[in-house]
Image: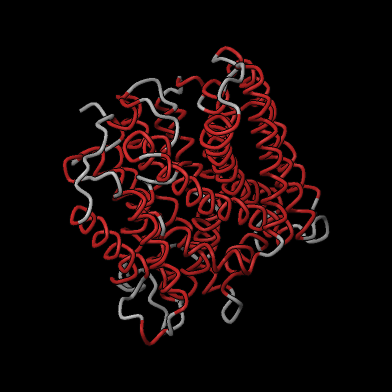
Amino acid sequence: MHWIPLTVVALYIGALFAVTAWARRLSRRSGSGLVGYLLAGRGLPAGVAAALLAGLAVGGASTIGVAERAYTVGLSAGWYNAAWAAGAFVMGLLAARRYRRIGITTLPELFERSYGTGARVLGVAGQLVLQLVITSLQYVAGGAILSSLMPDVFTLRSGMLVTAVVFVGIALIGGFWAAGLTNVINVLVIYAGILLGALLTVGRLGGLSAMAARLPAAHPGFDLLAVGPGLIAAWFVVMITQVHSTQAVIQIGFATRDERSASRAYLLGGLLILPIGFISAVIGIAAAVLHPGIVATEALPRVVLDLPPLAAGLILAGLWAADVSTASALLMGSATLVCNDIIRRFFAPALSPAREQFVCRVTIAVLSVATFLLALTVQGILRMLLVALTLATAYTLIVLMTLFAPRLCRRASASWTLAGTMIALAAWQLAPPAWRLLPHPIYFTWLVSLAVFFAVPLFDRRPIVASCPG
């Protein structure tokens, strides 16, 4: 019966490319240069931007990953998405208006305005590591979803290739408008698939109470703190940190119509992100009842395979939509960094708008090939992912200080804080586990970032260039 879920996925892909074709016309109206193509001419409505943010946040880790963890720790695994939502809320309330007001395209651009060229170069390097690593993981996640749920149709690599063709095609054809509008579809499909999976599975077990009664004795079930308060706190610190300093996340605010739209986009996006983790966790708990003793990574796929083919197809499309939506936004963010902060800044500052858009498309194509090849070394990528996410501490500290406390900043603050945090991360990775006194590297990098930032004024008295309007 694989033709039924395959048909559902094919219809979903068709809908994505139909919307992409429409988005291409909107992209042309927004202008032919970098801003028109990679920032939608700074004209995204709040609702589209919110869907883009939710699609970026809700990927394989927020669905399959949460269900996998919930298989052993129960509903508390859903705090992962709650932490993401908290980051979006803080961004919407605290910094979104200020970001949109200063009219920048990338974070490294802000660094150069205030701290000089060296800070911009370091900023680009760290951001590209962060985003290209996570983009690479989306190929693997997409391939794993297709191959695990339709093994007679897809292998892991053929599933990776189909995933790449879809989200790369969306980015190449329609630019940031396409990423935004297709994510409206993606979010609808994600919710439809995950909700359907949870409702059918819980109904099959006789309701939540009956499901809880059938859990293994040691399973924490619906205990919201079972995963551990320390890890939950670390998730919140990581997500609130990275949402202020990851190019793909903040670029959504840069692309909105105005300051008010930027703030509303993050607040609405947070509301869309919040429930998905707990719904996915319910499916993971159900898997613990239905399939005790399996490998935890199989929790959600096993539950889906138990359902009727049409329902399985809808859920498959929802899971795959989560992956595609994350990948397209990340790819656009990385292309913006390369085009704006490397090519336009150092090699071709006087390109015409048409040539600039051509360069952007070529950049997306090159990054797509590079990240696909990187995805083939997935074990190394998974180790690098922790490093990449934790690096966001230095970016967040520098940005927030620049925007809200510029008198505390010095010309060397950005370069030294970024470099110090990178060295600290390398030391953490190389140190024996017994030497790691803190429960998560995010705490260590925050301590190092703060120490370095506030030590810089001891030897550098030069104030930064005030380039951010209040």
Q: Is residue 207 above or below residue 348?
A: below
Q: Is residue 52 above or below residue 124?
A: above
Where residue 22 sits in the image (x, y, percent)? Answer: 64, 19
Image quadrant in which the C terminus is located: top left
Task: Judge by depth and name the residue closer to the eye, 177 or 312.
Answer: 177
The residue at the point 68 percent across, 27 percent down is: 173
Where residue 318 sits in the image (x, y, percent)? Answer: 59, 47
In the shown orientation, is residue 211 left or right of residue 292? left
Residue at the far top in the pictured view: 29
Where residue 55 sits in the image (x, y, percent)? Answer: 51, 42
Task: Judge by depth and name the residue closer to the eye, 145 or 381.
Answer: 381
Q: Is residue 415 above or below residue 331?
A: below
Residue at the far bottom in the pictured view: 434
Note whether residue 453 is visible.
yes
The residue at the point 71 percent across, 35 percent down is: 169
Task: Judge by depth and name the residue closer to the eye, 42 or 362.
Answer: 362
Task: Judge by depth and name the residue closer to the eye, 288 or 270.
Answer: 270
The residue at the point 42 percent across, 70 percent down is: 74
Where residue 302 sits in the image (x, y, percent)? Answer: 64, 66
Q: Quadrant of residue 431?
A: bottom left
Note whether residue 86 is visible.
no
The residue at the point 58 percent across, 68 percent down is: 299
Image quadrant in which the N terminus is located: bottom right
Q: Is residue 345 above or below residue 197?
A: above
| Colour mapping used in the image | secondary structure
Total marks in image: 0
In the shown orientation, is residue 252 left or right of residue 241? right
